[in-house]
Image (tube, grey):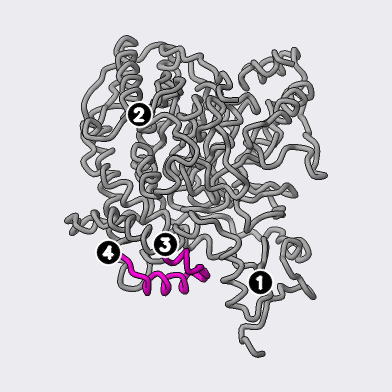
Amino acid sequence: MIDREQVLYVAKLARLRLSEEEVEQMTGELSGILGHVDRIGKLDLEGVEPTSHVVALENVWRADVPWESLPKDVALSSAPEPVDGAFRVPSPQADA
Amino acid sequence: MAEILDLTALAAHEAMRAGELSAEECAEAWVGAAAGDELNAYLWRSGEGGGEAIETVEAGLAPIAVKDIFCTEGVPTTAGSRILEGYRPPYTATAVRRLLEAGAPVLGKTNMDEFAMGSSNENSAYGPVLNPWDRSRVPGGSSGGSAAAVAGGLAPWAIGTDTGGSIRQPAALCGIVGLKPTYGAISRYGMIAFASSLDQCGPFTRDVSDAALLLSILQGSDPLDSTSVGLAGGVRVPDREGLAGLRFGVPSELGRDDVDAGVREVFETALAQIESLGGEIAEVSLPNAEHGISAYYVLAPAEASSNLARYDGVRYGMRAGAGTDLLDMYESTRAEGFGAEVKRRIMLGTYALSSGYYDAYYGQAQKVRTRIAEDFTNAFAKVDFVVTPTSPSVAFGLGEKTADPLSMYLNDFFTVPMSLAGIPAISIPAGLAEPEGGGPRLPVGFQIAAPAFGEQKLLDAAYALEQGIGFDARPGGTNG
């Protein structure tokens, strides 16, 4: 189960701004889904190794050979606000 | 022209090699067919918006429809999301590059649930795809555009991705063949990530032979994806006759599950067909499979919440808001750019990974995953394949399940366990059944799962069964 305060906290962690309507809807829907998912919490899985990867692979190497990087102008070409060879963003401080 | 459109991709390839069909002629016929898309299957078609027209290779392959989750250099790639509207990637996914190198040009990019999250294609920011069998119904998802394009005669073949059933379920609901290969069979490089430990590329085709041909091109290890290992020995087009000596396991838990009567009947008929082809039916037990949905809806959202952190309005895609400060810009961009289902999964995943809940959710789900993989290992000690219906129902109506996310999730019941175990599974059309509420009969998919890297044996058996079933129904354009 998840309450309104938790929804707001998780939204903050996820960098999602939710409308008042979304907060309400999310609280109900997530509670329903978690109610179903919580069934696995009741299983006794003591000592079971968690799956980290389905195919048993270890130490996958590739030759340490440099290759061409994406040219800077190409890397910047999809950015909303490229400036002077960099990605421009609003200031991290509101009043700066 | 119509004759070209009637050819399977394999037949077209053979006609090209014999000099009876030019690659240009073939591509032209399919560009014409794709132009008639009334299903909203395509988000972009070759030549559109100043994009490059189709380039053919002599004695090549029929052109292919590509799910819009694969990056294609210079060609719009949205993953069905508003947040990537207008994005043209600077590089091409390995799977697509392999197709181009083999001589299969890209016919278009297909519609999909946003970031592959959904089972009905109703979560696309660009509108739902319609099922070619009945336009008031969904094509399934998340690769609904690829499935509808092939079933609706808008593409000879297509590729999609499957995280918890996103190839097999739409293939079943559209009456075509869909294969999810073993995790690691095909490179994920350039495939926009949803849940990285589950995502796998695979074919949508009219028949099993085309699926084998397509897999033979796509598979292989790639230095740009260290989890890709390919399929040792490659893949050849199947020619097996009969099923003698093969054992097919039906999970005993199946009887307890909610499966529509019509789907169950087609499934039982296919089992009888297996026996008449000399195969043996046995009961197997997958006791932990019932927890598959719960584990999946922890693991996939958790991985998604991490993968989708990259969409922040800085390097690509849209940016929203006047942006009074950086945090405000992030939050506005993500609020406006993501749709409801994507937000729901990001929230679910972030919650499951948050401090104090990690062990109870993510850790526990990874243990369930181990148990489900063990169930399959035990089953495959007794049988060659595990078989189930692909989906508990035929295609449902547009809007029927959108109000209840959990009921939509439960639709993945039969496909999620194989994804969690990383094993290959194919859906082939097995017959038609009437929907629960009545109406024209719709396709039913039969799912066959095999041990990891058992694709050749799986394709051989699926081919033999396909010949026995002889499914040849085509969409009639009802409600069109």
Range drawn in magenta: A1-26
Question: Looking at the image, is mark 2 or mark 3 nearer the viewer?
Answer: 3
- Considering only order in the chain, which callout, 1 or 2, is on the residue closer to the N terminus? 1
Which quadrant does the N terminus of chain B fall into?
Answer: top right
| Left or right relative to B348: residue A68 | right
Subunit of label 1:
B
- Label 2, label 3: how many angstroms apart (C-alpha)? 32 Å
**Visible residue check, residue B457:** no
Subunit of label 3:
A
Who's the residue at 41% across and 60% down the image? B302
Co-location on one chain, circles 4 and 2: yes
- The residue at which mark 4 appears reads as B360
Who's the residue at 50% across and 53% down the image? B194
- Considering only order in the chain, which callout, 2 or 4, is on the residue closer to the N terminus? 4
Co-location on one chain, circles 4 and 1: yes
SS at circle 2: strand
Depicted B428 relative to depicted B353: above or below: above
Who's the residue at 31% across and 58% down the image? A34
Nearer to us in this view, B222 or A72: A72
- The residue at which mark 2 appears reads as B389
Q: Residues within 10 Å of mark 3 (few under 14, many from 20)?
A: many
| Left or right relative to B13: residue A58 | left
Q: Amino acid at mark 4?
A: Ala
- The residue at which mark 1 appears reads as B321
| Left or right relative to B185: residue B267 | left
- Label 4, label 2: how many angstroms apart (C-alpha)? 32 Å
SS at circle 1: loop
